[in-house]
Image (cartoon, helix red, strand yellow):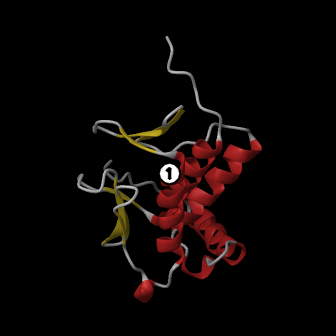
Amino acid sequence: MSPKIIKISSARASQLDELREHIPNGHSASYNEMIGALLNIARRAFDLKEEVPGVLVNRIPEGVQIFFEDRPASGLSVEGTLELAKAICTYIDSPVGARIPTHSYDWNFIVEGRGLNVAISVPAKSEPVLFTHDLARDLAGLLESTAKSAPRSTDA
C-alpha cells in the first residue's frame, strides 16, 4: 500500500505534539503512531471491528487463517499464532540496537526488521509483508484476539 500524504493545520500538529506526553514511549512516537493510537481509541469507543488494512485473519477449527493482500492464504495453529503475535511485540518493544529477528522453524514464520519497518513472513519462506511498528502492533493484537476466539464454522 503506497503512503498517502495528509495535511493538518499547525494547530492540530501542536496538539499531536502535546499528545506525545501521554502515549507510552511517546517521546519517540511518530505522527503515524499517534494517529494509530487515536484510531484504536476511537475503534474501542465506537465498538468497531478490529482490523489491519490489507490483512484478513479468521479463526477456523484447525487454527488461524491469515490473508495478506494479494497473497494466498496461510495458516498457523492457535499456538503458532500466539507465538507470532508475541514475536512481533517482542521485536517492537526491544531497544533499537538490541532487536533480534525471530526465525521460528517450529511455527514457520519470520519476524525481522526491514529499514524502519517490521517484516513478517508467513510461511517463513514467503516474501515478507512490511508493516510500520504501530500497524505491526495492531496486527499482533488482531492475531492474539482471533487465536483466542471461538472457531468459525467452515460449513456453507
Query: Could you tell me which residue is drawn at 49 percent across and 85 percent down?
Result: 95
Secondary element under disc 1, as helix, strand or loop, is helix
Residue 66 visible in the displayed image: yes
Q: Residues within 10 Å of mark 1 (few under 14, many from 20)?
A: many
Residue, disc 1:
81
User: Which quarter of the figure has residue 9?
Assistant: bottom right
* Residue situated in front as seen by the camera: 26 or 67: 67
What's the amino acid at mark 1? Thr
Q: Position of residue 92 (x, y in %)?
A: 49, 72
Vertical position of residue 90 compared to residue 99: above or below: above
- As drawn, 99 above or below 74: below
Q: Nearer the viewer, residue 56 or 106?
A: 106
Q: On the rendered structure, is 91 left or right of 109?
A: right
- Name the residue rendered at 45%, 43% in the picture: 53
Quadrant for residue 131, please give it.
bottom left
The reply, left or right, for residue 19 in relation to residue 113 is right
Residue at screen point 62% across, 68% down: 16
